[in-house]
């Protein structure tokens, strides 16, 4: 489990079946087997070489996220898994990317992204973009807008996005489970009163 609060911008050192990322800050306290969100995708540390974290990648992960398109030298958002005694500064993030969204525009600190799941979008709801916890400002069909403050632009890779870029999207975990219950038509009586 993650929070969407980025700890470090890492730099891709090598790509392939093994993804290598230079992470001098978080690499000091990371151990083999730890979970690290890389641009919002949960990966397991398979090896540590000095300040380089090495991850084994699966074909499914490379297919369903944007990690397969990374190149050596690219910057990525990094976050270690939430500790039980840590603060929850963002929102609950699983590290399981739902889809690749399309950046429609990026101007005046407003980022507009198009996705396929309108029902998973709610104004003032949470969304994760490339691993960053954000609040949806408004929704128009399958397009939503988030506002990016200076701190977010300084400490994440989101400021480098351009119109036409793809971005990893993870919908709010709680909303995803709630929608799943409603779609399957299985809410129990107590939950039904809470939902409706």
Image (spheres, rainbow, N blue to C red):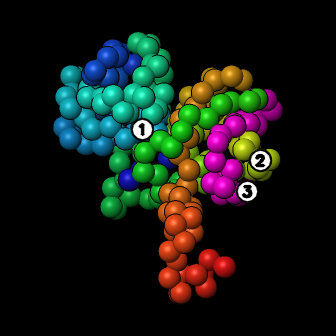
Magenta stretch: includes residue 195? no
Q: Residue at x 72, y 23 (%)?
A: 163
Q: Assess whether mark 2 and mark 1 are in contact (beta carbons under 8 angstroms).
A: no
Q: Residue under label 2, please give it.
A: 141
Q: Residue at x 69, y 37 (%)?
A: 114
Please tell me how crowded label 2 is: few (under 14), some (14-19), or many (20+) other residues with Cα within 10 Å: few
Of 14 and 166, the residue lying toward us: 166
- Find residue 179 and report its horizontal and vertical position in percent: 57, 63
Of 96 and 50, the residue lying toward us: 96
Q: Element type at marker 2?
A: loop
Q: Assess whether mark 3 and mark 2 are in contact (beta carbons under 8 angstroms).
A: no
Residue stretch in magenta: 106-125
Residue 90 position (above or below residue 47): below
Q: Would residue 79 be found to the left or right of residue 188 on screen?
A: left
The first of marks 3 and 1 along the sequence is 1
Tag on residue 123?
A: 3
Instruction: Please identify, in this view, whether the residue under mark 2 or under mark 3 is nearer the observer.
Output: 2
């Amino acid at each position: 489990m993650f929070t969407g609060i980025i700890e470090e911008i890492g730099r891709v050192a090598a790509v392939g079946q093994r993804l290598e990322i230079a992470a001098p800050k978080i690499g000091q306290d990371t151990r083999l087997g730890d979970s690290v969100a890389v641009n919002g995708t949960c990966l397991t540390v398979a090896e540590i070489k000095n300040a380089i974290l090495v991850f084994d990648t699966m074909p499914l992960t490379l297919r369903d996220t944007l990690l397969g398109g990374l190149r050596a030298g690219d910057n990525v958002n990094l976050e270690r898994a939430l500790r039980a005694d840590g603060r929850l500064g963002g929102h609950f993030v699983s590290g399981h990317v739902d889809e690749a969204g399309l950046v429609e525009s990026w101007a005046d600190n407003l980022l507009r992204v198009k996705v396929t799941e309108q029902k998973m979008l709610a104004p003032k709801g949470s969304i994760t973009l490339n691993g960053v916890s954000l609040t949806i400002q408004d929704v128009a069909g399958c397009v939503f807008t988030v506002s990016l403050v200076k701190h977010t632009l300084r400490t994440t890779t989101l400021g480098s996005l351009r119109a036409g870029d793809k971005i990893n999207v993870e919908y709010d975990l709680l909303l995803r489970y709630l929608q799943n219950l409603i779609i399957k038509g299985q809410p129990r009586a107590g939950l039904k009163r809470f939902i409706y």
